[in-house]
């Protein structure tokens, strides 16, 4: 907090400028859609960074909140003709409510149990999206989700969604950054390093952990709503446990000790996955499944063993050892 | 009446059969957790590898059913020990969260390798026994009886090892008090290696005996492992007997729930149970680690 305001916010200014000018270089629909999807993942991962890095908790089920947002938006707009923005808010409220309910058991428990409770929650949500076909369309999902709109202007094409997504990411980053430096953030850090000491100083750690869980769930839910309107069609496959694991991988790679870890991890894992999807079939032409997961697993293990603070963490403060603050161990 | 005795018997038997598998995987969790503190989410992959390796040995070699089963179990135990040396041992000083994420990484790697080698097609095993036992108008499937019986035998042998042999006692000592265990000359790193071997063998054994009933493929392990874990949590995560009871209860619950609810919801019930158990009585994991942290 010793740096003056301009310097502290310099990275956000750079990101803002990048967001504005990138479409000039990525003119193709393919490039823009890539950036939009990366933005959606970045938003979820930023929420996860807040939960891991500042809350000290791990969620193995964030794809569930992503799915809650997407399905809330899809169901409310297709069945009840609700305005997409209201549906987005409704989805965020649903996710916040579920996160609050989950945080009742989760906040009482040790970090590991939080991981397991959220994992179980993800499985349940996934099954409900598949089985409650009267509402969710079952395995084939929901199609013809209307686009986002402002007044009479419906968002068509890539550009509007690109900006909506990245404005949300930018706001999410700035909010998270300020939160980390605020009184709330400092108490979060305190309860992470020692719950008992923090409670002795009058910090209501259970309430705090619940709140950060809710915030993190809302980030993922907003991402889900935008995702649903952007693609126009969703199905359960995008919201299962493997997706949650992929988000974890992004955050571990980027690093959970800084607010930038989620965005960097999302960009890198997205690109790595795309490259693998293109190149793996050259080497293993007879295999039809997703062999790239083998490589993603290797990356996860290598990063955890050798760069536990994540890539951004390593860049900011080189030479920190495993287990120090910055890795969420 | 919809549920007559013969249907109830069938449901009970199938619940006991799946319960036996869950129990084997759950005991694998417990033995690894007890000696190393690691929740090994790759436990389901060990079961799948056991089934897949056995199926391949059966079709591609001249080995008989028994020989290929034993070899499959030993090979998976070896794989589990390699995993322990390469991934878990170097991370022995990190926190529980890093370790659980590492085992997730391992499970993804094993799944990917299985996909590379076996592809996406399921591999069926050969039945050990055929036919059914007629008992006073009730039909008891030999296959199920065999699974339940051999699981009981395997668990009895395992309990004997843990309670009566010197190595087994050393494994338990490492969990009770790693520091004291080290003073007594027990090497915790060696015990960690042994417990991974045991966990791998138990999982693989489970995979081998279900392979005639379930079409096992590369990604079966994800849910199998998670359910074994639920069974372990049910029993308190640190108790072998608790894990066995947890497995049986889970198997029976799923089996009877499938009668009452559409089968797609079966897994949802399982994980609802997990959340409720973790909330209401977070005994096992939480109790022990929280005490250590203070």
Image (spheres, coloured by chain):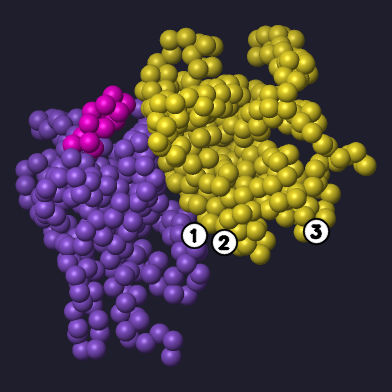
Query: What's the residue at 24%, 89% (across, down)?
Result: B137
Q: Which residue is mark 3?
A: A80
User: Is the residue at mark 1 from the same chain as the one at mark 2?
Assistant: no
- Residue B7 lies, in percent from the top left, at 35, 81
Quadrant position of residue B213? bottom left
Q: Which residues are magenta?
A: B78-93
Query: What's the residue at 21%, 77% (across, down)?
Result: B132
Q: Residue furthest right?
A: A152
User: Is the residue at mark 3 from the same chain as the one at mark 1?
Assistant: no
Q: Which residue is mark 2?
A: A131
Q: Is residue A151 magenta?
A: no
Quadrant position of residue B243? bottom left
Most frequent secondary structure within the magenta stretch? helix
Q: Which chain is purple?
A: B
How many neighbours does mark 3 have within 10 angstroms: few (below 14), some (14-19), or many (20 or more)? few
Q: Which residue is mark 1?
A: B268
Chain ID at mark 1: B
Q: Is residue B80 magenta?
A: yes
Q: CA distance from mark 2 to mark 3?
A: 21 Å
Q: CA distance from mark 1 to mark 2?
A: 10 Å
Q: Which chain is yellow?
A: A
The mark closer to the camera, 1 or 2, is 2
- Number of disc labels: 3
Proximity of marks 1 and 2: CB atoms separated by less than 8 Å? yes
- Residue A180 lies, in percent from the top left, at 63, 25
């Amino acid at each position: 907090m010793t740096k003056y305001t301009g310097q502290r916010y310099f990275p956000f200014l750079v990101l803002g400028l990048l967001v504005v000018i990138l479409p000039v270089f990525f003119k193709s629909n393919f490039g823009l859609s890539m950036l939009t999807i990366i933005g959606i993942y970045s938003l979820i991962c930023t929420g996860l960074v807040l939960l891991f890095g500042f809350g000290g908790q791990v969620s193995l089920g964030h794809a569930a909140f992503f799915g809650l947002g997407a399905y809330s938006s899809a169901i409310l707009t297709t069945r009840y003709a609700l305005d997409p923005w209201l549906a987005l808010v409704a989805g965020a409220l649903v996710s916040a409510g579920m996160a609050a309910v989950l945080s009742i058991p989760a906040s009482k428990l040790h970090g590991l149990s939080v991981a397991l409770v959220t994992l179980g929650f993800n499985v349940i949500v996934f099954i409900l999206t598949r089985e409650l076909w009267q509402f969710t369309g079952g395995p084939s999902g929901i199609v013809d989700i209307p686009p986002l709109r402002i007044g009479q202007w419906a968002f068509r094409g890539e550009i509007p969604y690109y900006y909506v997504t990245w404005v949300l990411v930018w706001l999410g980053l700035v909010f998270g950054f300020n939160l980390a430096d605020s009184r709330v953030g400092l108490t979060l850090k305190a309860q992470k390093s020692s719950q008992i000491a923090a409670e002795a100083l009058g910090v209501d750690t259970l309430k705090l952990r619940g709140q950060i869980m809710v915030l993190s769930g809302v980030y993922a839910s907003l991402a889900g709503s935008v995702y649903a309107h952007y693609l126009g069609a969703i199905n359960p496959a995008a919201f299962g446990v493997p997706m949650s694991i992929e988000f974890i991988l992004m955050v571990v790679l980027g690093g959970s000790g800084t607010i930038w870890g989620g965005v960097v991890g999302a960009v890198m894992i997205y690109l790595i996955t795309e490259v693998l999807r293109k190149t793996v079939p050259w080497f293993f032409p007879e295999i039809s499944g997703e062999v790239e997961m083998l490589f993603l697993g290797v990356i996860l293990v290598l990063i955890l063993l050798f760069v536990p603070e994540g890539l951004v963490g390593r860049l900011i403060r080189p030479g920190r050892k495993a287990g120090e603050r910055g890795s969420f161990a | 009446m919809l549920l007559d005795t013969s249907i109830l018997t069938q449901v009970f038997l199938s619940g006991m059969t799946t319960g036996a598998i869950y129990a084997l995987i759950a005991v694998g969790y417990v033995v690894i957790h007890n000696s190393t503190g690691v929740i090994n989410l790759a436990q389901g992959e060990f079961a799948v590898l056991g089934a897949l390796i056995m199926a391949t040995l059966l079709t591609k070699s001249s080995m008989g059913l028994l020989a290929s089963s034993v070899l499959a179990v030993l090979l998976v135990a070896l794989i589990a020990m390699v995993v322990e040396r390469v991934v878990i041992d170097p991370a022995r000083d990190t926190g529980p969260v890093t370790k659980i994420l590492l085992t997730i990484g391992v499970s993804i790697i094993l799944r990917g390798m299985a996909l590379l080698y076996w592809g996406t097609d399921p591999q069926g095993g050969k039945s050990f026994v055929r036919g059914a036992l007629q008992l006073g108008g009730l039909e008891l499937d030999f296959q199920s009886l065999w699974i339940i019986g051999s699981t009981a035998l395997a668990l009895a042998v395992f309990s004997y090892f843990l309670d009566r042999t010197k190595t087994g006692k050393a494994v338990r000592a490492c969990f009770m008090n790693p520091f004291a265990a080290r003073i007594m000359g027990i090497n915790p790193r060696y015990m960690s290696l042994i417990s991974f071997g045991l966990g791998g063998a138990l999982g693989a054994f489970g995979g081998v005996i279900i392979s005639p009933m379930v079409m096992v493929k590369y990604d079966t392990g994800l849910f199998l492992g998670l359910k074994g874990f639920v069974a372990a949590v049910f029993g308190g995560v640190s108790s072998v007997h608790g894990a066995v009871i947890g497995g049986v209860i889970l198997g029976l619950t799923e089996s009877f729930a499938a009668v009452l609810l559409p089968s797609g919801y079966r897994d949802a019930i399982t994980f609802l149970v997990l959340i409720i158990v973790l909330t209401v009585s977070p005994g096992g994991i939480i109790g022990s680690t929280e005490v250590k942290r203070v």
